[in-house]
Structure formats: C-alpha cells, structure tokens
Image (cartoon, rainbow, N blue to C red):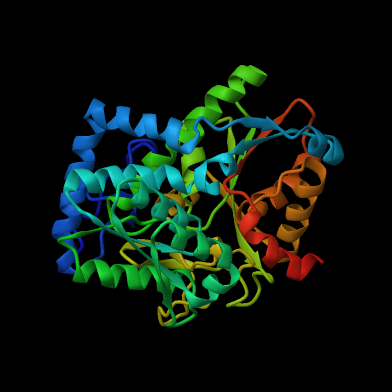
Amino acid sequence: MSEPADATQTPLTTTSLPDATGHFGTFGGRFVPETLVAALDELTAEYEKAQADPTFHEELDGLLADFCGRETPLYFAEQWTKKLGGAKIYLKREDLLHTGAHKINNALGQILLAKRLGKKRIIAETGAGQHGVATASVAARFGMECIVYMGEVDMDRQHLNVVRMNLMGAEVCAVTAGQRTLKEAVNEALRDWVTNVRTTHYILGSALGPHPYPMMVRDFHRVIGKEARQQIQEIEGKLPDMLVACVGGGSNAIGLFHPFLEDKDVKMVGVEAGGHGVEKEGDHAARFQGGKLGVLQGTKTWLLADDQGQIELTHSVSAGLDYAAVGPEHAFLQDEGRVDYTFATDDETLDAFKELSSVEGIIPALESSHALAYVKKVAPTMSPDQVIVVNLSGRGDKDVEQAAKYLL
C-alpha cells in the first residue's frame, strides 16, 4: 500500500483542505496498490488543469443546466412547518435533478475528466442505485462503455434502478461476496480498476476513497451549498440557522456544508443511519457512534471495526447509507467540532418518509429521510424566526416498494 511519507501536516483552515497529500488533518490520504498510484496522480493533475480551464467550467455549467436541470429550487415546506411548529423548514430540491438525486453533479464532472484523459471505459459502484443511474446516464450521453458494480442485496431492494441502468446501456454486475452491499461493490470496482487502469476511469460516487476523490467529489457537489446560500438570502434576507443532511459516504452533505464552513453562526448537522439502534454492532451504520479510526478502501477515516480491525457488518433500511466508513472530510469536521453528527433509526426514518409524502406531496429518498427525521425532532424546539435548510438529496420513487414492506 502506498502512503506519502510526509503525511503529518500543520493545521490549515477548513476551506483550504485537503493539503497537497490529500489529508484533512489526520484523515484522508492515499492507501492504494502501487498499480493505482500513477492513475491517481494523472487524475489529480488533470483535475487541477480542468479547474483552471474556463472551457471546462463552461461545458460543465452548460450541461448541469440543460442536461441535469440546475439550479434546483429551495422550497419552503409550508405545510410541514405548520404541522411541526417552530423553525421554518426549507428543502433543497436535489430530488428534482435528472436521474433523481444529487449524484449527477459528480458523475457529470468526472465523465468530463475521463473525456479529457482519453478514457472510454467507465466503472462505478452503487448502493441505492442512484450513483449507478447517474453514471449510466452520463456514460450514455458521451458514448462510453459503462460497468456498474452493485451488491446482490442492493440489487434486490433497488430493482427499479437496476432496470434504469440497463435501459441506458450499462452492465450491472452483481457482487455476491461478503454482506453483498455497498462496501463489497466498492471492492469489486477497485479490483476492476487495478486490472484495467490504462483504459478505465473509476467514477467513485461519494466523498471518500483515495485522494483526489474526496476533494474532487466535494467540489463537484459544492454547487448545492452555493445555490442554497444565495437562495436563502434572497428569500429570508439572512443565512440559515441550521443545515441538515444525511451522511453515508457524505457527498450530498459536504456539498451543502462546505460553502458555509466559515459562517460560524450556521449550525450543521449530519445524520447517519441508526438502523435498528446503535447499541449493538451490525444493527446500524453510524460510524460516529462507537466507531474508530482506521483505513478502508483507500482512505484513513472513521469506521466501524472490531478490536482486531476487521470491518463490522452494517445495517440500514436505506441502501445508500449502509456503509462502514465515512468520508475523511466529515471525520475531520467532527474532530474539529464544526459539524455535529447524530443518527436516525429505521423507524424514525420511515416515519419521516411517510410524513413528508402525506403533508407536502413530496416522496423523499430513504437516505434523505434520515435528515428529515432529525428535522422532525429539532424544528419544534426552535423559534419561528429561525430557519432550517435540509438537503433533499434524492427522490423516493426507488424506495416505494422497500418502504411499503414496513408501512403498508
């Protein structure tokens, strides 16, 4: 495994991270087979060139608008606000994007990098299927071969998204190892990349993995927070009092949070998957509830592991949050005390899923419903002049059959 020798760093401001070695404080870095080092160096260099190239941003912004449907609305959930009492609740409507979730922001940015690199074979991992659908969509748009790795359990509970990926020409490969969920899908994608590194670009779907992925995925999703920041000031004439987002790997959350990190009066809350409860290992995927520092799939971060360092089983009603590690920037922000991390159980999540659907006529993704479950608890404790912005990271069409097993 390769890790830069000078991993120790002096503290930097939260918005200037990561450092040159890909570290957010003690978290992050690059722990990969030597086979991938050159590819990651090439990707880092090309990303830096693209960031300085106006034509890259023009193409990306144009596609985000015309292909994806940005900017997304900031919607005042008036009926839900009245029902709960307390703070005003605004939903950042990433669920209205093409393919149904925030994932298209990153997938589109990375496919443009792949084009610049001359890579015509695309691979991805997916849990809830939304990243796989987004990757299949952009691969079809640019005429590239697309392979998506997905755990067998997730393929069953997210069958609709498997069909969508197939319709757009992607090959969905079932992963039957281990728990047959997201962690194993990432493992298979990494094995594929090692084997086919010269011809293949790996569109990693969350703000984790080896450098430059946590930085790059965050940057492609910062559009969420940048839009929300401008929109709430136009609507309310001030910044929000609180931001809330669900956290699996953490891409939607870091995209919302990052443009507000220097605004110390804006409280930020990330909501993990509490599953059946956080008291027993294997019943949840809340890494900040009893987790520990370790290395998983290319990065040093907070994860769920036993005393021997073996990765624990996880559980969540939402496939997209059913993962043993969290993005390294989230680990850093938790360590710094800038963002608070809590959890919502399956029951709380399903209750919020049903309530938003019935009160606002908006069916949210089960992932996003974790954030809604926290809002449901905290909004009534706040005053009516306070404002909450919650990231509705995806829509719940994909989850209706899964939720119906519990609710109907």
Above or below residue 116? Residue 163 is below
Above or below residue 147? Residue 370 is above
Q: Position of residue 168 (x, y in %)?
A: 43, 56
Say which residue appears at 22% left-offset and 29% top-offset: 53
The one of 80 and 275 positioned closer to us in this rendering: 80
Q: Position of residue 301 (x, y in %)?
A: 40, 61
Q: Position of residue 151 (x, y in %)?
A: 47, 73
Say which residue appears at 52% left-offset and 71% top-offset: 155
Above or below residue 385? Residue 41 is below
Side of 66 where 233 appears, left or right? right
Q: Quadrant of residue 238?
A: top right
How many numbered circles does the render carry?
0
The one of 288 and 273 positioned closer to us in this rendering: 273
Q: Quadrant of the C terminus?
A: bottom right
Is residue 337 shown to the viewer in this render?
no
Q: Quadrant of residue 309?
A: bottom left
Q: Quadrant of the N terminus?
A: bottom left
Is residue 353 shown to the viewer in this render?
yes
Side of 114 where 310 appears, left or right? right
Above or below residue 176? Residue 360 is above
Side of 132 where 200 appears, left or right? left
Say which residue appears at 37% left-offset and 40% top-offset: 219
Say which residue appears at 17% left-offset and 57% top-offset: 39
